[in-house]
Amino acid sequence: MRKAAFAAFVGATAWIAASCTARRSTPTLTVWALGREGEVLPELISDFERAHAPLKVVVQQIPWTAAHEKLLTAYVGESMPDLMEIGNTWVPEFAAIRALRPLDREAASSKALAPGDFFPGAWDTNVVEGRLYGIPWYVDTRVLFYRTDLLARAGVAGPPRTWTEWIAALRKLKAAAPPGGFAILLPTDEWAQPIILGMQLRSGLLRDDGRYGDFGAAPFRRAFGFYIDLFRDGFAPAVSNVQIANVYDQFARGDFAMYITGPWNLGEFRRRLPPALASRWTTAPLPGPEDGEAVSIAGGASLAVSASTKHPAEAWQLVEFLSRAAIQSRFHDLTGDLPARVDAWRTPALARDPEARAFWDQLHRVRPLPKVPECEHIARKVAEYAEMAIRGKMTTGAALAALDRDTDRILEKRRDLLARRKARP
């Protein structure tokens, strides 16, 4: 009896040990997703987990406001997730510190995705110095939201396609506006509008491989002057976002007829505007200069694999899964985010959406911001000096000269790094 009991004990112990070892060896993939995306991602990956059992995916939702700092802290503390959602303007920064795993080999051999499956401008945001560091997950850009009834009342036949048509439309809208009303809303603390106008005139914003600012050069100078004149001519109010009580109420009242904004406002306009206005607003691609390109900025977020992951194959499999057209379509249904994959737009929800059509058109004409880690800091400086010029605190020339000086200071470390790299044998 004692031998039998001892044998049973040994067998049970071995079974428990084997079970614990099996549990410990079950691979776990950690994923950080931001904002609303972090809420819905667990719902999307249940099919992936079933197909890749016993792999487990643990999703942590990170607020957008804390994400950048948290990712940097995790990198320094060697606690990066295996896979992360990353704003595409952050890609150059995290690639520079070698926090991201290059994905060229995986993308080249993938049967699930290829560069041509995505909007070219969105794909390009993930390519830094010739290497691929992320796969576009969703996209955004800026287009023109406008009141169709107010344009018709002012005698404007349709949305402007060129800068000349735009100025003519703004002049008519301003003349037809009620007392205190304006033609367009361009919040003075936003950098996107002056940068887009500069890009439309083919300004690179920076020069010498991102070593110096190029804002004083002719293309951006002209675009900046065009932007400032929209305020000086009375077409737009000199107000920042914090000075706007409720943009949706003001749009509904007709305080302005046009507004440059992004896809997140499709859902907001539908929810917040009165039902009577449902057929009185729509969207259009941005107008462009006759001697330039009607481009907009390539925004959105991408999926990037940590350079320190112990599960690179599994992380890439999840990237491929989340990049499927059907999954991107479902992701759009859950979040309202626009798919980065072109064929995901064939679904009825997007193909029959009249307001989304302008984004479809514009997303074929988007450009990434300069691929330097300091890009967002520089963009904020653009808004800062533009606002000073708008409010008459600086002349246009002085604002651009100061912007170039600040940009050159911001890029000082980059110049030093590039010089050191060039000096290496």
Image: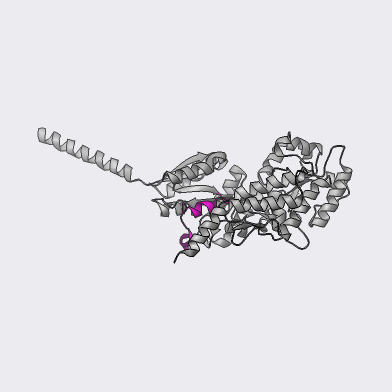
Closer to the camera in the image, 310 or 23: 310
Picture quarter with the N terminus:
top left
Closer to the camera in the image, 270 or 236: 236
- List x then y, in percent, for residue 332: 60, 46
- List x then y, in percent, for residue 81: 44, 46
- List x then y, in percent, for residue 364: 66, 58
Taking the spot 45% from the left edge, 64% from the top edge, the residue there is: 424
- Indicate the colouring scheme: one colour
Closer to the camera in the image, 262 or 371: 371
Taking the spot 77% from the left edge, 63% from the top edge, the residue there is: 291
Picture quarter with the C terminus:
bottom left
Asked if one can make out residue 31 in the rendered structure from this viewpoint, the answer is yes
Residue 218 picture quarter: bottom right
Q: Is residue 110 magenta?
A: yes
Q: Is residue 175 above or below residue 344?
A: above
Asked if one can make out residue 322 in the rendered structure from this viewpoint, the answer is no
Q: Is residue 20 above or below residue 119?
A: above
In the picture provided, is 288 more to the left or to the right than 116?
right
Taking the spot 43% from the left edge, 50% from the top edge, the residue there is: 51
- List x then y, in percent, for residue 114: 54, 61
Residue 64 picture quarter: top right
Magenta region: which residues?
A: 87-111
Q: Is residue 47 magenta?
A: no
In the picture provided, is 70 more to the left or to the right than 335?
left
